Amino acid sequence: MEIIRHNEETLRTALISNHKDVIEQYQKFSPRVKRLLEDAFRPDGTLFKPIELHSKSDWILSHPEAKQDFYTFYSSPHRKAPIPGKNIIYIQTIGSFGDSEATTETYILWLKEYCEAFFYGLKVKFLDPVSVSQTGCVFRINAYSQNLQIHSGSILKYLKKKKPKDAFCIVGITMIDLYPEDSWNFVFGQASLTEGMGVFSFARYDDDFYTTNYKGRLKEKKLAPDNYSVFDGYYTPPITSKLLLRSCKALLKWIEEDSGSEFLVRTMLVPLKPMEAFKEWKEWLLQCLHLLEE
C-alpha cells in the first residue's frame, strides 16, 4: 500500500498558486480568514487527508494526470460554469431505490440536499422516476458476477432526449450495475462532457456486492434482449447510512466530472475572473465565520 501525503509547500502552491495577483489577494485577507484557510495547508489538517493507494490499479496510479493549481484550474477554457438560464442540475433515477416508497423518498431527499449544499447557488431537481424498460436500454447478465447490468451508452442516449433546456447538466443514477462495452466487466459511471450528462451506478457501494451473500446474482445465463420483466422485483440493496454516504460523495464527484472538469461552484451564476472568485469566496467565508461566532 502506498500513501500520498503532500507537504505544506505543495498544498500552499496548489491552493494559492504561484500567480502574483492571487498571492497578493490572499495577503489582504484578515487573520481570522487566513486561520480558517490555512488548515488546508497543514499535512495533518482535516481538509486534505493522506490518500491511500492499495494497488497499482488504483485510479491515481493507473491514470496519471498533470498537476493543476487553483489559478490554472479557474482559467481553463474547458471548465464549464453555470449561466443564467442553464443553472439547474437534473437527476434522473432509473429503476428501484430502497425496499419501500418511504425509504426511496428519504434517500432521494438526502441526495438532493447534499448536492444543493455542495453546489451552492445551483438548483437540484429530480425528474420523475423511470423504470429500466422506459429507457429502452440494452442489458445483460455479467458472465462473471452473474448480476444484471445495463448499458451505460444506451442510458446516455435516453438522457440526451430528456435533458431540459434550462439544465446545467443531467445525471442518471441507478442501483443496477453498468457496463460500457461488451468487452468490459463493469463501469461505475460514464459521462459526456460535451453534452453535460452522465449516468452512474451505486450498486457496487453495497457491502455485500463482492461477497457470496450478494442477492443480485441470477441463475440465468442469457436473456432475451427485450425481456425487461427480469428487472421487476430485482434485488435492490438496503439503504444503510454507509451506502447513503457513499452515494452522496460519489454523486458529487460524478457531477463534477460530468460538468466538463471539476468546476468551482460559485454563488453568482456569471463568469468571474480568478481575482473576483477569490474575493467572492472571502465574502462567503466571512459569512460562515459570522454564523459560527453567533
Image (cartoon, grey):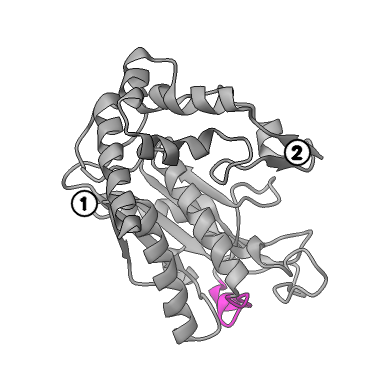
Res 130 visible:
no
Secondary structure character of the magenta stretch overall: loop
Taking the spot 62% from the left edge, 42% from the top edge, the residue there is 49
Quick one: label 2, few (<14), some, or many (20+) residues within 10 Å? few
Residue at 29% over, 38% down? 282
Q: Looking at numbered disc 1 in the image, what kind of residue is underneath it?
A: Asp
- Circle 1: element type: loop
The image shows a total of numbered marks equal to 2
Residue found at the far left of this picture: 84
Q: Determine the residue positioned at 43% across, 65% down.
A: 111
- Give the extent of the magenta segment: 227-239
The residue nearer to you, when weighing 240 against 71, is: 71
Mark 2 secondary-structure assignment: loop
Q: Which residue occupies the foreground of this view, 230 or 243? A: 243
Tell me where residue 146 sits by quadrant. bottom right
Q: Marks 2/1: CA distance?
A: 39 Å
Relative depth, front residue between 78 and 119 = 119
2 or 1: tag closer to the N-terminus: 2
Instruction: Tell me if mark 1 has few (under 14), some (14-19) or many (20+) residues whose alpha carbon lies within 10 angstroms of its own.
Output: some
Disc nearest the viewer among 2 and 1:
2
Would you say residue 236 sits in the magenta stretch?
A: yes
Left or right: 219 with respect to 85? right
Q: Position of residue 87 (x, y in %)?
A: 24, 49
Tag 2–tag 1 contact (CB < 8 Å): no
Left or right of 193? Residue 239 is right
In the displayed structure image, the side of residue 24 where residue 108 appears, left or right: right
Q: Which mark is residue 166?
A: 1
Q: Is residue 104 magenta?
A: no
Q: Say which quarter of the image contains residue 93.
A: bottom left
**Which mark is drawn over residue 57?**
2
Q: Which quadrant holds the C terminus?
A: bottom left
Q: Quadrant of the N terminus?
A: top right
